[in-house]
């Protein structure tokens, strides 16, 4: 979970010797441990999980911020999983819908919206998603 130690020789390599200590948290390790504990399931419902299949995270970050600005609870799946595992994670965490960015689920100018409960999905235009009056729900 955490690592660290003394790094006295580190700053000397950059021309300024000084005593130093440091540490870091391994957030991914923490998330993996929490994910394996069924008793740690979410107790409240959340709106969206963003499942980003693109290498670039900027679009997912922009969409997440836009949804939060509209009052939606939004999580990003930061652990690389496939579609089915991300959907299972969303279900365990009581997230209603998953937004898929990239991949073969829709066109480049669209995002795939999946209702977690029954896996029904629909492609929506990214421009619609950003409109203030757009209602994000699947009507199938």
Image (cartoon, rainbow, N blue to C red):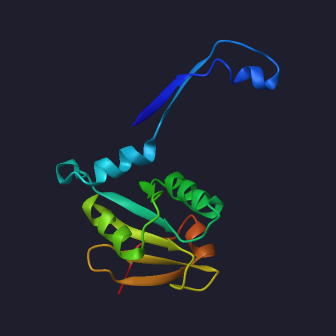
For residue 6, side relative to residue 92 (left or right): right
Residue at (29, 58) in percent of width and height: 93
For residue 99, side relative to residue 108 (left or right): left
Residue 12 occupies quadrant: top right
Q: Compare residues 70 and 8 and report the one nearer the observer.
A: 8
Residue 59 occupies quadrant: bottom right
Does residue 21 sit above or below 30 in this rendering? Answer: above
Q: Compare residues 20 and 119 and report the one nearer the observer.
A: 20
Q: Compare residues 74 and 12 and report the one nearer the observer.
A: 12
For residue 28, side relative to residue 140 (left or right): right
In the image, farthest residue toward the right: 15
Q: How many marks?
A: 0
In the image, farthest residue toward the top: 19
Residue 88 occupies quadrant: bottom left
**Residue 28 x %, y %:** 43, 48
For residue 12, side relative to residue 6 (left or right): right
Does residue 18 sit above or below 107 in this rendering? Answer: above
**Residue 17 x %, y %:** 75, 14
Does residue 35 sit above or below 128 in this rendering? Answer: above
Residue at (62, 16) in percent of width and height: 20
Residue at (28, 56) in percent of width and height: 45
Instruction: Tell me the quadrant of the picture where the N terminus can be found.
Output: top left
Instruction: Tell me the quadrant of the picture where the C terminus can be found.
Output: bottom left
**Residue 73 x %, y %:** 41, 54
Residue at (45, 40) in percent of width and height: 26
> Residue 135, can we see it?
no
**Residue 46 x %, y %:** 34, 57
> Residue 117, can we see it?
yes
Q: Compare residues 17 and 45 and report the one nearer the observer.
A: 17
């Amino acid at each position: 979970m955490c690592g660290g130690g003394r790094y006295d020789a580190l700053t000397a390599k950059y021309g300024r010797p000084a005593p130093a200590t440091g540490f870091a948290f391994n957030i991914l390790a923490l998330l993996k441990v929490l994910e394996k504990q069924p008793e740690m399931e979410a107790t409240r419902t959340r709106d969206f999980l963003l499942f980003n299949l693109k290498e670039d995270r900027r679009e997912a970050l922009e969409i997440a911020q836009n949804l939060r600005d509209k009052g939606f609870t939004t999580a990003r799946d930061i652990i690389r999983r496939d579609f089915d595992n991300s959907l299972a994670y969303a279900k365990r965490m009581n997230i209603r819908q998953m937004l898929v960015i990239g991949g073969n689920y829709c066109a480049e100018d669209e995002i795939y919206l999946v209702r977690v409960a029954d896996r029904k999905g629909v492609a929506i235009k990214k421009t619609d998603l950003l409109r203030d009056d757009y209602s994000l729900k699947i009507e199938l």
